[in-house]
Amino acid sequence: MQQTDPSKHIFSDKLEYLIAIGAAVTANCIPCFEHLYAKAVQSGSSMAEIQRATEIAGQIKNGAHIALKNSMNEIMNTEESNKQACSSGEDKPCCC
């Protein structure tokens, strides 16, 4: 990925593209994913690495959806979800 300041280039291009792929997945941006997928392959990322980046992003996205559903259920005073989203310091199972 192009950097405006070379001193801020602390990750390899390969790692930056894998991170960006995860962000594209969580943002539901298909054009971003397509562009970044090609760049990741060009930078030497394996299909296993790209797949793992998408899996992690999917887990995060799923956790955010569970947290949203739980909050809406709480606000509407309806039944709670059986699944738990990631929590900060609480002793609950985590989605990711």
Image: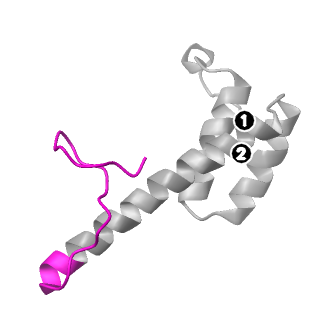
**Left or right side of 45 for 29:** left
The range drawn in magenta is: 73-96
Residue 41: image quadrant is top right
User: Secondary structure under badge 2?
Assistant: helix
Tell me the quarter of the picture where residue 27 sits: bottom right
- Residue placed under numbered mark 1 in the picture: 49
Q: Camera-side residue: 52 or 8?
A: 52
Whether the residues at callouts 2 and 1 have beta carbons within 8 Å, the answer is yes
Name the residue tied to disc 2.
51
Q: Nearer the viewer, residue 2 or 54?
A: 54
- SS for callout 1: helix
Q: Position of residue 92 (x, y in %)?
A: 23, 49
Disc 2 from disc 1: Cα separation: 5 Å
Residue drawn at (81%, 33%), measured in percent from left and top?
46
Q: Position of residue 13 (x, y in %)?
A: 72, 26
Locate residue 31, reporting x and y percent. 74, 62
Type of amino acid at the residue the image marks with label 2: Gln
Q: Amino acid at mark 1?
A: Glu
| 94 left or right, relative to 38 | left
Q: Nearer the viewer, residue 4 or 84?
A: 84
Question: Taken as a whole, is the magenta stretch helix, strand or loop?
Answer: loop
**Badge 1: residue crowd in 10 Å (few <14, some 14–19, many ≥20):** some
Residue drawn at x 70%, y 31% as measured from the top left? 2
